[in-house]
Each structure stands twice: as structure tokens, then as C-alpha cells.
Image (cartoon, rainbow, N blue to C red):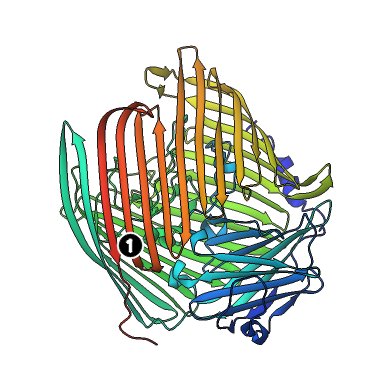
Amino acid sequence: MSLALLPIALAFVSWQGPASAGGPGATERVVVATVQDIVLDGRVDEAGWRRSPGSALAMSPGSRFHAGTDGRSLYLAILMPAPGPADRLEFVLAPPPGDLRVRLTTEPSGRRSATVDRGANGRPSAERLWQNRSVAAVEPRFDRLWSGHWDLAVARDDTTWSVELRVPFASLDLTALSGDWDVTIRRRTGTPARWVRQTVVIGGIRPEPDGPIAVTPQGVGTIRQQRSGIIATTRFQDFGVQARLSPARALTADLAINPDFTAAEPDEQRVNLTRFRLYAPERRQWFGPIDRTFRLGLEEEVELFATRRIGFDSLGREAPIVAAGRVAASFAGIDVGILQVLSDENRNQRGQSITAARVATRLGRLRLGGLAVRRAARTLASDRNLAFGGDGRLTLGHGWSVGGWAARTDSPRLRGGDGAFGAAVTRSGSRWHHEIAFAQIGEFFNPEVGFLTRRGVRIYEIESSGLVPIDAGGMTAIRPRLQVRKHDNLAGFNESTSLAAETGLEFGAGLRVTPSVTSRREGLEVPFLVAPGLTLPPGRYSWVETGLGVATDPSRKIAVAVRFDGGGLYHGTQLGGGLTATVRPVPRAGLSLLVDHSTVSLPTGRFERTLTGLRADLAPGAGLSWRSLIQYDNGSRVWSGHVFLGWLDRHGTGLALRFDDAHEADAPWRWVRPQTRIVSLSASKQVRPWSR
């Protein structure tokens, strides 16, 4: 099964299919105008809009698009002919450098929603449904903080449908504002529904004069209570500062002393029935851009550098960051990024010094880059690690591209087999995306400030996904996806093989149904402890899993995403699924119930894994936001709670209160003993000594 589908996949890759109606329209460029006193009522009748030149939209006759700024916010407005009852309008905004996309949806009735995608180059994080089962894979993720800052108003009469959108610059990192913004406008119209879209590039965006230097003093007061035999309570205050120096648009430097991560979101727990680590994205805002731009390797499989490893030891215990700095510069077509972090010691490791440097350039259709990462104990020279590599991608035209990467590591006491490399051929079009990839990871490849699922393997991957518009039986689109993935160790032993296929069926009412089937083969050379008291013996195991996902329109007041999974697991069976049920009585408030459950029956025993969670979000406006997340895992028998209350006056200025609690528990309502309790209060104020 491993590579038997390769000829078929190659033939499939070479076929792109004919262009269809509703594809991407021509790109328009609009220069942002200066506007004042915009009243956000959806009517686009202020004097500022009349001075804005705007642009006609080819996607819909009689439509017009405007962009303006008052130095504090970006305003967008669109006027279209009167809509029908089933119409919908979407804005997809991609601020530079393209690692963030925000989707805002509105209907003629005024109903609206907001979702956000965070990922490299604007692509959503690749959460493979058949590899790490998660109900999030079938539910677009609602943003839980942005809706308090981004405002949208709708108005209509007998002839016109108009929308106004305000994006406060205070809600964004100012390094990501200057430059061109891409705005994709999509309109669903008619019965049966038909989508048309067009991309508009907004140029000339300049926030109000911010000066070449921004300094943000901050104070954090923390009470930490931890149980280790006895309850130990510590109280401490951290005073820190963050500074930004930007003497030119092509040069930015950031420095942080005792950086504050109070606003970082906790991870949503997931059931993991595999032998390998699950990838976790970076959630600390200061490291976010670094984590995405310093990537080299095979995404979520082997990455030379991952900021998630900074500030934690090998057991996941916190090692406070003392100081951090980063520099980003562009000159003569070369982009340079440098990161330096100093962390404090904890009970498990010495204080660390971590340095990362990234260089990239573009020569016509060829992009080349290099990355080096060094970790060293601050008090012991022999405790060190070095990882370095290079990558490149050549764009061939007609959607084709070919890329590759290679890396090595250098660690004391590890010699031989310390290299890794990979290559991929990709074809992307308006409807289809196909990729064939290969990677080999040496037995002693050791990126200690990176992410690695396994060593000593060769990885083969074929993946195809597409979008097929259709008007039949209320269905609007079909999204097929096929993936073949194979892992062999360097001796040729097959460790893992999977063939996964799923088809997303989209309906006009926002309903999405996703059936899937996955065939797996696992080879164990050593025993595997799949659950406490249950060990799988070495051998070869084959099974088939089936799944069905159903998700309703997440913009509705009540939205449900549910997934059912069943079939085999090793030499037994498993049955389970996931549920996310969300109630949003108003656009800026929501309550979600999260459930992920698996029942596994093996010849040697039976066990159940259940994750339950309750998430509440509130963003009443004026920069205020509240979020809370309560989770219970019956596998680790841990109950955890997280509450965050924040007020953001502008980026870098505000107050934040955070409360985290963890208990050993036999059930969500039956606590046994406390583990950790942390209360933090932080305040920050951004000042600018000079203005441009």
C-alpha cells in the first residue's frame, strides 16, 4: 500500500481541471485616504468617504470599495446592489507580513461573525484530522479576543447594501501595519448559492506618527502556590521593560527584560493515543512572529527551531526568561533576523543562552535561506547544542514549485547520523493543491530548540486537496482531500503507514458534513505502553478507522461541531468522537462545551480517555476582554482552570489579571489535592519619547 498509489497521485497532480465561475477575480489596488469623524453605522455617507477615491469592483456591477484611515484605525467600506435573502458578504484581511488572516462575515440582517487563522504565510495551522483527531478540524476557530476591537456595521435599503468596518491599530502589533494589506472580498448570492470573489490590495497605510523608539515599562505581581509534599507559597514582583527601536522601515530591533506573558492563552488538551508527541503552537505574543518566520524543516514533523522550547526545560517546567532581543532588517534584497534569549535556571536545568539567526533572499523565482540555532548553558561550556541548515524553493510557473532543505546538529557525546534533509514538489491553483514530499532524519539528529516527533526515519508523503463548486440538492461545494504518509526506519522497517481520505460536503445554510476513512499500519520493535497497565508487544498491526464530522454555521447564535470515530486500533477496537457546542447570545460573548472521548478495547484490557472543557469568552468593547477555560483529563487525573481579564488601551498599554489553578482530581467535580495555583497582575504603559 505504501507507494503503490504514487503513479496515480502523480497523474492526479498533473491535472488541474478547468477554470470555473466564481474563481479569483482581478486584483485591484486602492490607496488609503485620510478620513475623519467616521460614524460606524454602515451607511457610508460621511464627508470623509466622499473624498476617498475608492475603486469599482468587477466582481459585482455597481459595487464600490473604499479604504481610509484617521491615523488610529483603518476603515473599510463597500457598497453593493441590494442583496437577496440568502446573500452573505465576507472580508478576509491579511495584514503584512502575511502570517495572519482575519475573516469577518456579515449578512443583510446584520448578523456577523469573526474567525482568525494563524499560520505560516497566512495558511491555517495544518491540523491533520487523521493524525491528531480533533473536532477543531471541522469547526472554523472563532477568534475570542479580536471581536472586542474590530467593529462592523451593516445598512440596507431597496437598492443598496453597504458595510463599514473599523480595524483599530491599537489591537495589532505596530510592526505589522506599514505596507500593503490584502483584502479578499467574497459574496454569496443567488439560489442555489454562488460565490464570487475579488482581491483588493490596500497601499499607503501609515499609522499615526509613532516615533523611532517605543518603550513599554511593565510590572507583574505574582503569587504562586505549589504542592510538593507540602504546600509552598511564594510571592514575587517582576519589573520589566520592552523597547522597540525602528530608525528605518527596513530595520527594527526589540528588547525585553523580564518579558510579560500574562496574556498567553493556555493549550486546549487533546487525546493522544499515539507513541509520538503532538505539535503545540506558540501562544506567547512576543515570540509569535519569530516562531513563524524562523521555520526550517517539515512542518509539525521536524522543525529546526521552535520557540515553544524556549523558557521550558525537557520536562515542561518553566524556566523564567530574563532577557530577550530580536533584530529584523532588510537591505539589498536580503532579509536578516536575529534572536537572543537568556533564561534563568530551575530545579531541572541550568540557565540557558539561546541564539537564532535567519537569512533569506530572493533571486527571481528562486528563494534561498539559512538558519542557525545555538543553545548553551550559561555556567557549563560543555552543555551545548548547535543546529544549522539551509532551504530553498524554486517557482516554476503554472502553479508548480520545487523546494528542499538540509540541516545538521552538533551535540557533545553524539556523533554520526546527525543530519536531516527533505524535498517537496508542489502544485497549487485556484481550486487544487497537490504535494509530494520526502524527508530523512538521522538517528542522532538532535535539534534541542526545535521540534521532532521521531529520529532515524525516512518519511514519504503525498497529499492532494481541492475545492469543487457544485449546485445540487442544496450543496454548494465539495472539498476532497487525500493523504498517503509512510515512515520507515533507516534499516527499512516500516514504523507507520497511513492512507487517509476525507470529503467535506458544504451546504448553503453553512452546514458542513465530512466523512473520512483511514487505513493504518504500525510496526513496533519495542513494547509500547498505550495506557497505564496496558502494554502492546512488538509486532505489526493493521486497522481501519472511519469518521464522520458534522458542523453547523459557526456564525449562528447556536453552533455545533461534532465528530464520530470508530474502527480498529492496533489489535483491538476504538469508539469515540468529539463535540464543540457554542452558544453566542450576542456577537461578543460565547460559551462553549468541549468534549473529546475514546473507548479502547484491546485483548489485554480496556480503557477510556475523556477530555471535558468549558470555555467562556466576553469582549464587551472599549478594549475589554474576558476569557476562561476549564478542562479535565481523566487520563492524567488533572483538573485545570484558567481565567484572564484584560484591558487594552492600545498595543503595549493595558492591564491584565490572570488566574491559573490545577488540582489532582478523580472527576471534574471531585478534587483530591491542589497542585498549582498562580495569580498574576500585570500593568504596562507604552511611551514614545520622540515622534517622527
The front one of 511 and 559 is 559
- In the depicted view, which residue is nearer to us: 120 or 406? 120
Number of residues whose C-alpha sits closer than 10 Å to that of mark 1, classed few (under 14), some (14–19) or many (20 or more): many
Q: Nearer the viewer, residue 374 or 179?
A: 179
**The C terminus lies in which quarter of the figure?**
bottom left
The residue tagged with tag 1: helix, strand or loop?
strand
Counting from the top left corner in percent of width and height, residue 341 is at 28, 60
Asked where in the image residue 91 lies, by quadrant, the reply is: bottom right
What kind of residue is marked 1? Leu
The structure residue drawn at horizontal position 75% and vertical position 51%, both measured from the top left corner, is: 14
Q: Position of residue 318 (x, y in %)?
A: 27, 47
Q: Is residue 4 left or right of residue 359?
A: right
Query: Percent position (x, y) of residue 48?
Result: 61, 84
* Residue 297 placement (x, y as % from top left): 48, 52
Q: Is residue 546 left or right of residue 653?
A: right
Residue 249 appears anywhere in the view: yes
Q: How many numbered marks appear? A: 1
Q: Quadrant of residue 396?
A: bottom right
Left/right of residue 569 with respect to residue 433 in the rendered view? left
Q: Residue at the location (33% across, 28% down)?
A: 665
Residue 26 visible, this angle: no
Which quadrant would the N terminus be assigned to in this image? top right
Task: Identify the residue under disc 1.
Answer: 655
